[in-house]
Amino acid sequence: MNDTFELRSGETHIEVHKFFPGAIVAVTVAALVLQASFPVYFPRLEILDLPMLVTIYFGLSRRNPSTGLLLGTVIGLSQDALSGPTVPLGFYGIAKTIVGYLASSIGARLDTEHPAARFALIMGFFVLHQATLALTRRLLLAGEPEAWLNAHLAIAAAVNAFLGTLLFLVFDRLRRSS
Amino acid sequence: MLRTDKYLERVTMSAIPSRHKSLALLGAMLLIQVLLLAVQIKRDSRGRLIRVWAVSGASPFERGASWGFGRVRGVWNHYFALQNTSRENEALRIENDALKLTISQLQSRASEADRLAALLNFRQAHKDVPMLGARVIAGSAGTASRTIEIDRGERDGIRRNMPVITPDGAVGKVIEAFRDAAQVLLLTDKDGGAGAMLVQSRIQSPVGGTGEPTLVMKYVAGDDNVAVGEQVVTSGMDKIFPRDVPVGTVIEVKAGTPFKQIRVRPAAKFDRLEEVIVLLTQQPLEFKKVAEAQGAQTGAQGPQPATQNSAAGKPAVTEKP
């Protein structure tokens, strides 16, 4: 059986990738564990959001909006659960659900295999992710207004995009060969 | 090859669900997580966020429903359901009259309780003085005399010429004692009176009634100084009243020859006599201390000028040469 399908939408041919069994789970768990460890051992790496990168990657690769948003939900809720009692369940969940849905929706329409496209997409999704977090904090958690659109966000988006682009190349090796 | 193509097509269709389906799933997942947030978050003093949302969302409809029901009920009650109104109105009127009567009775009883409490206090303050409480059961049959009838008589130890007082002051004396009742001649009667003296100047003179609400002090020499506001007490010289029972207050002094004309406002409330005390002795009462204190105060301040009394709303001194 083939590991790669072709989506026939007009003239374009977009592949839906499959991964080795347990690859998605393993990568997700690893990302969550590392994300939880960063603040302890590498405070400077706090700007990284590995669960978000994993959500984007598998969303873009699977190209199934339902699968993408469900994966984003699971990853986000897991991140909430690991973030301690001060972070309510659903805070990261909402943001990553949206990111997962949009990533898989875009992945179903565009070819996102090129590193430049991935870099730009990761940057865009990171900003969207942070905007969703700020909106959730402001509207649902009655938090104080905060200036989230600043230079720090741009730097964090660039760093995450750079690291994500590299990581995606590694994750590509987890795909089953066609 | 054909079989493989069909398989791929089927798998692809199942792998890529419809756009609406995925959008619905997205909405559902977001809604679940928003609700999850709402259940967890607790706003300051307003309960959990889910409750705040629920109440905020429902309250406009509840208000609208309440307004609507209120209007419907109002229209029904005020325009359609009036068949019993007249009957209810009549019943309410009767009930209102009964309640008014009850209130009047209760007020009367409360007033009586106050008076009895005053008598009781007076009685307890003079435990060593033989006295008897009595209820006024009748007044004068005509305007020619000012007497009252009390519900105590000879069987209770009441005898002629026993003094009758209230906690406020002297009232009169027993003129007739029957088996279970007695008649009391009030100080305000034309034939009533008592031996009295002015507290400050210690001038003695009998006071008597004129048939009017006020008393007169009859035999004060024209050259004696008497001030308005001075207290008048019994002197004990009439062998009826003990000394120092308050009689009244000087309210008007007119110069005269050979005697001044002095009007005294009675200390006892003759228009509200319902319970009285019959003294069974001439032993002096504690009134003395009160009278002396008032006399000392009056002496320290000196006679009050007429203008001051007028300003205070009291009758002015009309001392004529």
Image: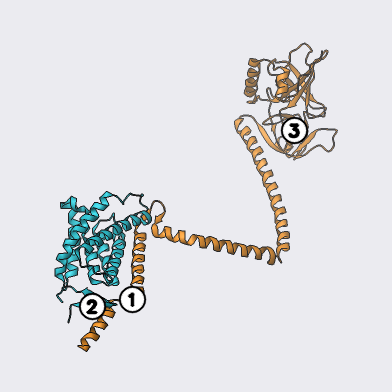
* Residue at image point 63% right, 32% down: B122
Q: Tag 1, which chain?
A: B
Q: Which residue is mark 3?
A: B270
Image coords of residue B227 (percent x, y)? 72, 17
Residue B272 percent location from the top left of the image: 73, 36
CA–CA distance in space, label 1 to label 2: 17 Å
Amino acid type at image mark 1: Ser
Colour applied to chain A? cyan
Residue B18: which numbered mark, if any? Answer: 1
Q: CA distance from mark 3 to mark 2?
A: 119 Å
* Front position in the image: A125 or B38: A125
Chain B color in figure: orange
Q: Please report, as a chain letter, where disc 2 is located.
A: A
Q: Residues within 10 Å of mark 1 (few under 14, many from 20)?
A: few
Judge left or right: residue B18 versus residue A48: right
Identify the element where label 1 is drawn. loop
Tell me where residue B22 appears, x and y as whole percent. Answer: 33, 72
Q: Nearer the viewer, residue A86 or B197?
A: A86
Confirm whether circles 1 and 2 share one chain.
no
Front position in the image: B60 or B143: B60
Q: Which residue is mark 2?
A: A6
Amino acid on which the number 2 mark rests in the picture: Glu
Q: Is residue A48 visible?
A: no
Chain letter for mark 3: B
Q: Quadrant of the N terminus of chain A?
A: bottom left
Query: Quadrant of residue B276 in the image?
Result: top right
Number of marks in picture: 3
